[in-house]
Image (cartoon, rainbow, N blue to C red):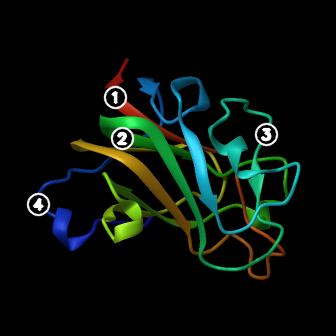
Amino acid sequence: MLLRISRFFLFSFVILVFTKNLTAEDIISVNSGGKVIHWTFEKAPNVAHNIIDTDKGTYWSSGKAVFPQVITFSMPGNKRFEGFSVIAKNANDPTTWAKEIRISSADPFPHMGGWVELVEIELPKDGKETIIKIEPTRGRYFRLEIFSTHGSSPTEVSLSSFSVYNKMEKK
């Protein structure tokens, strides 16, 4: 699994990848007030909102194999967070599942170039949940960029879920 951190955060972020026994609150889900505020493409009924809707049966698909795909999320306010969860596996063709992604955060003005790259990672081919723990930081907006899929000639891009965790603990 490929994992890269921006040079700026090389010394301030520690990244650990967990795969089981996680206790955490998802602060970007629609249940916590999270919203999808921008996306490159989406194909109904697999809309971008599905990534944070907490329904494990829904997913997002782009409808086009254009890269990068960019999805931007917002929370009601600036919050502390220390990790992420990404699941690529969904009911769509596995060749469309997201592979190389980057997660960035901003507060308060993402439209003014305030993005800080937090992590760049390659998701596993089996599409199972990848959990990334970082040193605690704060933010309100998140940008998820997808640069490739697991297929050599995909017709679109898809992703099941994206979560942001305020506190992460192993059981």
Residue drawn at (53%, 36%) of the image:
34
Q: Is residue 59 left or right of residue 147?
A: right
Give the Cα distance between marks 2 and 1. Answer: 7 Å
| Picture disc at residue 83 | 2
Residue 115 sits in quarter: bottom left
Q: Which amino acid lies under the numbered mark 1 shown in the image of this protein?
A: Met
Residue drawn at (44%, 52%) of the image:
142
Q: Are marks 2 and 1 in contact (CB under 8 Å)?
A: yes
Q: Secondary structure at mark 4?
A: loop
x, y percent for residue 120: 40, 65
| Picture disc at residue 168 | 1
Classify 145 as above or below 164. below
Q: In the rendered structure, which disc, 3 or 2, sits on the residue that comes first in sequence?
A: 3
Circle 4 residue: 11
Between residues 85 and 150, which one lies in front from this camera angle?
A: 85
Q: Which amino acid lies under the numbered mark 4 shown in the image of this protein?
A: Phe
Q: Residues within 10 Å of mark 1 (few under 14, many from 20)?
A: many
| Picture disc at residue 58 | 3
Residue drawn at (26%, 69%) of the image:
6
x, y percent for residue 168: 34, 28
**In this rendering, which labeled residue sits more in front, label 4 or label 3?**
3
Residue 84 visible within the image: yes
